[in-house]
Amino acid sequence: MACGSEITPPTNVEPAPAPVVPVIGEHSIDIIVDGQKVVTLAEARLRGRVRLDELLPTTSYLLWSSIAAYGPGVGPAEWLDPSSNFAGLVPEAFLNGGVGAMALVELGGDPAVADSALRIAGIDEIHITLAPRPRTWREELADGCTAVDTSERPRAVTPRRWKGPSYNWNAPSHWMNDLEIDLGDGPAGARIGRLRAYTPDFDLTCVSELYRIGERNGRLAMRGVHQRNCATGVVELACKGDQLELRWYRSDGTYTEHGMLTAVP
């Protein structure tokens, strides 16, 4: 082509077709659990109806705290604690007139004719919120027997010192306990604390070094090795509300003492 010549665009080029954008909510439903999308139910599956409680077999329906469903300009419809508040009904997703829908229905019932308060159509998302998992005894101890702080503030340091009374019914006496302890996880046999206890009944002070045994009876178990005036035995600790429950056993396994300790700031 000669320099400076003009380029004539072809006249027979057709414009590219506009992309086809599916209408939201017509042919699929996203299932979102605790804010995370776990699956998209496509049209083929929805035509056969989908039991949502069977869709998530590793998560018991009893632990669902709510179900919410909505779409463009529709809803949300929300059902709280569905397994209790709607006992005998199960959650199903399906197609209703070509659009995504959901209902709480009796087993074998027709979701398309379910009560209007238990049915919503034109949806593209179903949000399932799970009830918080109960903390284990280890997690409760690691949190210092306090409620979990859900704010964004830095987590408080687990208390290392606890004080409180106990009663020994083997040799009837009242004790005041001063416990220094590491409540975190660690290897068996490690020294994790010291227990100082005083009884005015005998004007006696006991001191025991504490060595981790592990889990026993759903509690943190330690061997208390006497350093002064005390017999060697086994100590068990567990949270009871915001206090630390202490149990003392003699070396022969006899349960002899119980106390409730409070964290020292």
Image (tube, rainbow, N blue to C red):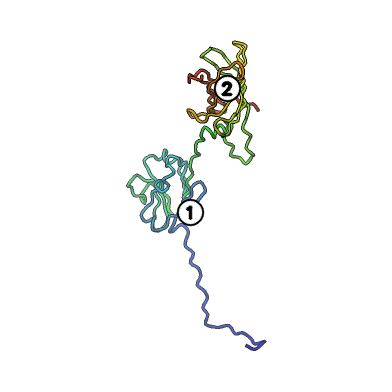
Which residue in the rendered view is the most extreme toward the bottom? 2
Determine which residue is flagged by label 2: 225
| Residue at screen point 65% across, 87% down | 5
Q: Does residue 118 sit above or below 23 in this rendering?
A: above
Q: Does residue 133 sit above or below 2 in this rendering?
A: above
Rendered location of residue 79, percent (x, y) = 45, 43
- The secondary element bearing badge 2 is classed as strand
Determine which residue is flagged by label 1: 71
| Residue at screen point 59% across, 85% down | 8
Amino acid at circle 1: Gly
Rendered location of residue 16, percent (x, y) = 52, 74
Say which label, 2 or 1, has the lower sequence index. 1
| Residue at screen point 48% across, 67% down | 20
| Left or right position of 119 against 257 | left
Pick the front one: 149 or 104:
149
- The secondary element bearing badge 1 is classed as strand
Amino acid at circle 2: Val
Rendered location of residue 202, percent (x, y) = 60, 10
